[in-house]
Image (cartoon, rainbow, N blue to C red):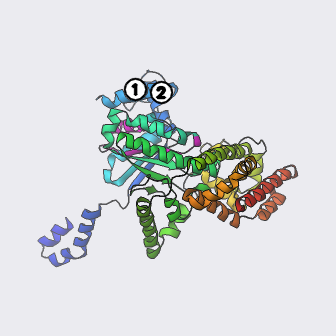
Amino acid sequence: MCYRSLCSCGDRAIADGSLLDFLRQVSTFGLSLVRLDIRQESDRHTDVLNAITRHLEIGSYREWSEERRQEWLLSELSGKRPLFGSDVPKTEEIADVLDTFHVISELPSDNFGAYIISMATAPSDVLAVELLQRECGVKKPLRVVPLFEKLADLEAAPAAVGRLFSIDWYKNRINGKQEVMIGYSDSGKDAGRLSAAWQLYKAQEELIKVAKQYGVKLTMFHGRGGTVGRGGGPTHLAILSQPPDTIHGSLRVTVQGEVIEQSFGEEHLCFRTLQRFTAATLEHGMHPPVSPKPEWRALMDEMAVLATKEYRSIVFQEPRFVEYFRRATPELEYGRMNIGSRPSKRKPSGGIESLRAIPWIFAWTQTRFHLPVWLGFGAAFKQAIDKDAKHLHMLREMYNQWPFFRVTIDLIEMVFAKGDPGIASLYDKLLVSEDLWSFGERLRANYEETKSLVLQ
């Protein structure tokens, strides 16, 4: 209108200046600056569907088996009639989920990227989002990306994705392309860094096999944080240490919080970061990293079991751990500081399992103890070496020849170089009650032992 008005009153010279430039920019790039991903926890979708099935008096969706859920979701997706009206009783949480879908339906589709389901476990999680998008009138549905985070979910992910690809309705919907997100933060918090890294590696290999079998191009979406405990590390090395065949010229990575500024904050930095990503992605395709030898895999499997056991025995099973953690670190203070992008906890009342990965890692970083990163490594190395002296030689061979293993160990070394148990013990002296001092000392002894094993 501005342009036409200027032209009609003889001001064409003005109209063809910056206004025309602006019109061209809008027609080229659209009005949205960046595509927004939507993210919601699978449990919240279950709550919504549960409210709907109860309202329709056909049972409780939450209590149905996975088979029954899939069957019902598919019959609804294949049908034509609307599933629910505005009369479904809504709690604040349910209204929140449905309102999000309604907003997606009102805005142009090029404003959005993917709909990510955190804590996904099963095919029904994905189908549920497909159904809710349709019911809320989303004209061009967003691509749905399951995010597998906990150790057990990563193990079960390939089977769940395979089941999804075997559903004709879904296969037609995705047009030969699927994105799967894997979580570094919560897997690390659930089982410790060593086991999480190895399980993420294996899950990717299996997911790619499943996708090949069904003729789907799979893009892995890496949900990494900035710190080592949350999957951080040098970009180039991180990409080159991924399993062979898992990249194929495309990958997606989250860049979070403090890392955005240091990687993209200035023009030359941004260019260098993008160059690194591109170079590593091309190199991975042209010179794929070596596949681990069967005996390396067997040793990793064995060590991962030991590392998980040691990690969980302290973090989840030691009755004094939560009390020690809350006193020896500024975790509770982090929750009160309004600086995070999300609440510090998933459920306000829960223990470590409901605490989000960010305050969990940063609380230990603050005391220079970095416990979530190294805990479990020591026990795994020690038992492997004690069981068979040849294992030490094999571990050295793995370090020299296998990029994935080298990166994992190098990052642990870096954390030990930054760590300072002396500072952690000062926190203990000032903040922790005397009856817990021995517990802190035990953890610091474990730290020193792990450090010397890594050096070996």
* Residue 350 is inside the magenta segment: no
Q: Quadrant of the N terminus?
A: bottom left
Q: Quadrant of the C terminus?
A: bottom right
- The amino acid marked with disc number 1 is Trp
Q: Is residue 384 left or right of residue 410?
A: right
The numbered disc on residue 72 is: 1
- Pick whichever, 191 or 126, lies toward us: 191
Residue at image x 38%, y 52%?
A: 113
Nearer the observer: mark 2 or 1; the answer is: 1
**Contact check, label 2 and label 1, Cβ < 8 Å:** yes
Which residue of the protein is positioned furthest toward the right in this rendering?
Answer: 434
Query: Looking at the rendering, which quadrant does residue 287 occupy?
Result: bottom left
Q: How many marks?
A: 2
User: Which sits earlier in the primary sequence, circle 2 or circle 1?
Assistant: 2
Do we see residue 319 in this rendering? Answer: yes
| Residue to which mark 2 is pinned | 61
Which residue is located at x 60 percent, y 47 percent?
A: 295
Residue range of the region highlighted in magenta in the rendering? 126-151
- Secondary structure category for the residue under label 2: helix
Q: Residue furthest bottom?
A: 13
Picture layout, residue 276 above or below residue 181: below
| Vertical relation: 24 (above or below) 363 | below
Instruction: Establish if 93 lies above or below 82.
Output: below
Q: Amino acid at mark 2?
A: Tyr
Task: Answer left or right for 450 relative to 273.
Answer: right
Residue 58 horizontal side relative to residue 300, left or right: left
Residue at horizontal 49 percent and vertical 60 percent from the top: 239
In the rendered view, tell whether residue 78 sits above or below residue 126: above
Q: Give the percent coordinates (x, y) of residue 17.
A: 22, 76
Whether residue 355 is visible here, answered yes or no, is no
Q: Position of residue 371 (x, y in %)?
A: 70, 55
Nearer the observer, 403 or 226 = 403
